Amino acid sequence: MKTYSNIFRYFNVITTSVQQHLPSCRKPTCLLDYFALLVLSTLLFGCQPKVFLMPTPVGLQPDGQIFKMTGDSQDGNLLYTLYATNRKPYDKLDDSSGYTIFPSGALELGIVVHSVGDKDTTWDDLQKQSLKNDRDKDLLLNQEYVKEMVRYDKDDVLNRTSSRADGFFDQINKNIARSFNKDILVYVHGANSSFYRATAMGAQYFHYMGHNSIVLTFSWPSAENLLKYKTDVLHAKQTVPAFARLLKILALHTRARNINILAYSAGAQVVTPGLAYLRDLYHALPAEELKKRLRIGEVYFAAPDTDFKPFVKRYLKFKDLVERTTINLNQNDKILRLSSIQNGVSRLGRPNPAELSKEEEQILIAAMKTPRLDVLDVGGSEALRLGGAHDSWYNHPWVSTDLFLLLFFNASPEERGLEKFYFQNGAEGYHFPRDYDLKIKQIINEHKKDILPKAEPGQEAQS
C-alpha cells in the first residue's frame, strides 16, 4: 500500500490512504441484435484503451523553468487534479467513488489522483522521461484514487455549502494562491470517453504545466462506445445545464482569476450551447456585468465536433462573456468527416462555409478580424503534416506547445509565434510557420525571466 502525503497537503479533508481503483470494462449492449458484429465489438469496444503520456511539447527542456516552480507539489509520480461530473455514481464497497455511463440530475465535484509509469518511478524519473523526445518506454497513466467531495442536487441553491464543501473550496483557493497560474482549466472530453480516459487527459496537462495550475475535468456521461455516438450526442445535450451550473459554482466559490475551458471534439456539444445557455439564463444582465461575474477567460475548441452553422448564432450570444475564443480546425480530419456524414452537416472543426447565409458569413469574417476570435488552421499548416489527424492538440508537440502558451500566459497568436494568413473569403486565420520549432524556442528563451522561480532572500534565481 502506498500512502500519498500530498493528498493531505492538497485536500486536507481526506484522512485515509489511497487504494488503486481502475475502471472496470463495460461491454456494449446495443449489438445484441447484430450477432455478426458481436465478437468484433467485444474486442474493439469492450474496454477503453489506456492513456499514455503525450509527446513532449517542443521547447520544454530538462532544465526548463516551469518544473522548477513546483516547490512542495513534487510527490513522486503522482498527478493531482479535480473533476466534476453529471454521471450517475455506482456503489463501491470502499470509500472511493465510481461512475456509470448514465446521466444524473446531480453534479458532483471531487479529486482524482493518477500515477505515471510504474510504482518505482520517482519525481526525477518522471521529469526526465516526460521531457525526452525519445523515451525509453511508454509512460502509462493509472487512475489511483477518486473521491467525491461536493454534491449539488438539481434544485440545490448553489451559493449554499456544507462544512465539507467549504473545506474543499478553501483548499482549491489555497492552491490557487500558491500557484504561478491563477486560473482554473476546465477540460471537457469528447465522445467515446470513459471517466478514466477523460481525467487522465486532464492530468497530462497538469503535469506539463509544471504542476503549477488547477485542472478540473468535466466528465459528462459518454456511452464509452464508438457505435453509440448518437447516445453521446443525446447525453451531451442533456448535460448543458449541468455544465452551466459548474461554471457558476466555480465562479461563486473559488478565487480563480479566470476560468479557462478546453473542449475536445464532441465536448464542444456541451460547451458551445452551455455558454449560450448562460447568456439566455441571465438575459436581463448587461454582458459586461455577467462576464465579470463568471470570469470566463480562454475558450479553446480542439477539433470541435459540433454543427458549424448553429455555432455562429451561439457564438454571437456568448462572445461578450469570454475573453477569447480559439478554434482549432483541420479540413482533412477523418473523424470529423465521418461525423459530418452521420449528422448531415459540417462540423465546426471541419467547416463548410457554403452552409452559411451571406449575412452569417460576413458576421463571422468580422468576428475573426477581432482579437476575441482566433482560428488556427492546423490542417492547412503544411509543416505539421497532420493528414487526417483528429488529436493534434495533444499528440503533436507544436500544437500542444501553442495551447500551453495560450492557457498559461494568455498570449496572442503572434506572441506565440504563429503567422497570420487569409482564407479565400477574406477571413483571417493563423498557421504554424515552417520554422516554428526554432522560433518557439527563441520566444521561450527571451521570456525565460518571466517564469523564473523567485529566489530566496539573499539568493539569486537560477537561470
Image: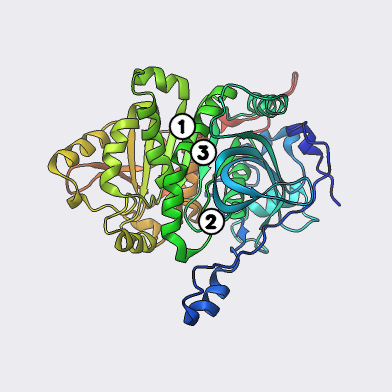
Secondary element at tag 1: loop
Residue under circle 2?
A: 193
Q: Which mark is residue 410?
A: 1
Q: Position of residue 220 (x, y in %)?
A: 52, 47
Who is closer to the viewer here, 318 or 324?
318
* Coloring scheme used: rainbow
- Between disc 1 and disc 2, the foreground one is 2
Q: Could you tell me which secondary element the residue under label 2 belongs to?
A: loop
The alpha-carbon separation of the residues under discs 2 and 3 comes to 34 Å
Can I make out residue 267 in this image? no
Kindly identify the amino acid type of the residue bearing the numbered disc 1: Asn
Indicate which disc, 1 or 2, sits on the residue closer to the N terminus. 2
Q: Which callout, 2 or 3, points to the residue nearer the camera? A: 2
Residue placed under numbered mark 3 in the picture: 444
Amino acid at pointer 2: Ser
Residue 307 lies left or right of residue 416; in this view the side is left
Q: Is residue 399 left or right of residue 159?
A: left
Tally the marks: 3
Residue density around tag 2, few if under 14, some if 14–19, many if 20 or more, within 10 Å: many
- Farthest residue in the bottom direction? 36
Confirm or deny contact between disc 2 and disc 3 (CB under 8 A): no
Amino acid under label 3?
Answer: Ile
Residue 115 picture location, percent across and down: 72, 51
